[in-house]
Image (cartoon, grey):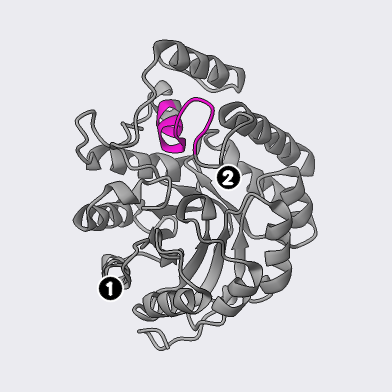
Amino acid sequence: MPAGGLLMNRHDVDWRGYFAALPTPFTRQGDLDLDAFTTTVRLFVTQGAHGLLVNGSTGEWAAQSTEERKRLAETAVSAAAGQVPVIVAVTHPQPAAAVELARHAEAAGADAIMVPPPPAVRPTPAELHAYITEVAASTGLPCWLYNFPQENATHLIVAQISELVRLPNVVAVKQSIADDSELQATIEAVGDTTLVFGNLLSRRGLAAIADGHGDGHFGSGMPLGSRMPRFFDLAWKGDLEEAGRIADDFAAFMARFKGQDHDGYNWRYGGMQASLKAVMNLQGQPGGYPRRPKLPISDPGTLQEIARALTEFGLAVVD
């Protein structure tokens, strides 16, 4: 049983809609910029995000020390001020370190933790189950599973997810596999007891929501601002026409920024994190810089091209 002694499932939490993975702003010199991070948390809440994720892939967890990750978790909880749920990713190849981060997240007042497979380890199914069991059991918080093999090279297949959601405090899955058919298979396999978030800010997602299936979308930041949570607000009200237009805008935006040859992590103009930060900075938002070895998008011609794209999608660019 988890530390809190509770058996949980999707009915014990009230989470749905657009959850934004927070970028972590660094200065040009590579220092953590907590003031900019606080501003970003408040901005995303103001724009209507239904939830926030700290230290995910978008947040460059691998570039940070454990103490920096803890400070970000504390800052996010404080800045969100209970207005939306805050989830803390505890990604780490070492189970003891992941447990330390999970316990800290609970002490800091986070609403949940997110546990992906251990990166760079390539665990066997038995090793994976033991790892996630140990980390999840270290806290009384609800726990998300996270399937993003594009980053950590371990693919959580649907059969493994079905087994892992039986753990006492696993209530949700962030299914970030590129194959939408696998998202659908995940919903069908575990959706009765487990929240499933995936690529649902889409026409296909709209159909699923209209049918009463699918819970939400976990995205990198909020590049289209308030339109992203508004998609879900409209879908829940039955305004499928306007929600569909937002889905079309988002699909076109992502196609423009990812390009044809992307690998799910590195996009047309640069890395995923650098691209999101350029989008934010050009709009006058505190995106900051990525931390090395990730590099910022600094070529003037590329930045002009991104600025033109933002304008085409109705986003204001600052001079």
Q: Is residue 237 magenta?
A: no
Looking at the image, which residue is at 34% across and 35% down? Answer: 294
SS category of the residue bearing label 1: helix
- Read off the magenta span: 266-278
SS category of the residue bearing label 2: helix
Looking at the image, which residue is at 56% across and 61% down? Answer: 155
**Residue 271 versus residue 305: which sits nearer the camera?**
271
Counting the numbered discs, the total is: 2
**Residue 292 versus residue 42: which sits nearer the camera?**
292
> Residue 96 has which mark?
1
Residue 162 percent location from the top left of the image: 62, 76
Look at the numbered discs 2 and 1 and tell me whether their residues touch, using CB distance below 8 Å: no
Among the 4 quarters of the image, the one containing residue 12? bottom right
Q: Does the magenta stretch include residue 271?
A: yes
Q: Which kind of residue does numbered mark 2 sit on?
A: Pro
Side of 10 relative to 295 (left or right): right
Which residue is under mark 2?
A: 229
Q: Which kind of residue does numbered mark 1 sit on?
A: Ala
Residue 200 percent location from the top left of the image: 67, 50
Residue 139 percent location from the top left of the image: 35, 77
Looking at the image, which residue is at 23% across and 39% down? Answer: 33
In the image, residue 82 above or below residue 206? below
Q: Distance between the residues labelled 2 and 1?
A: 36 Å
User: Can residue 134 be seen by looking at this rendering?
Assistant: yes
Callout 1: few (<14), some (14-19), or many (20+) C-alpha neighbours within 10 Å? some
- The quadrant of the image that shows the C terminus is top left
The numbered mark, 2 or 1, whose residue comes first in the sequence reads 1
Closest to the camera, between mark 2 and mark 1, is 1
In the image, residue 109 above or below residue 261? below
- The quadrant of the image that shows the N terminus is bottom left
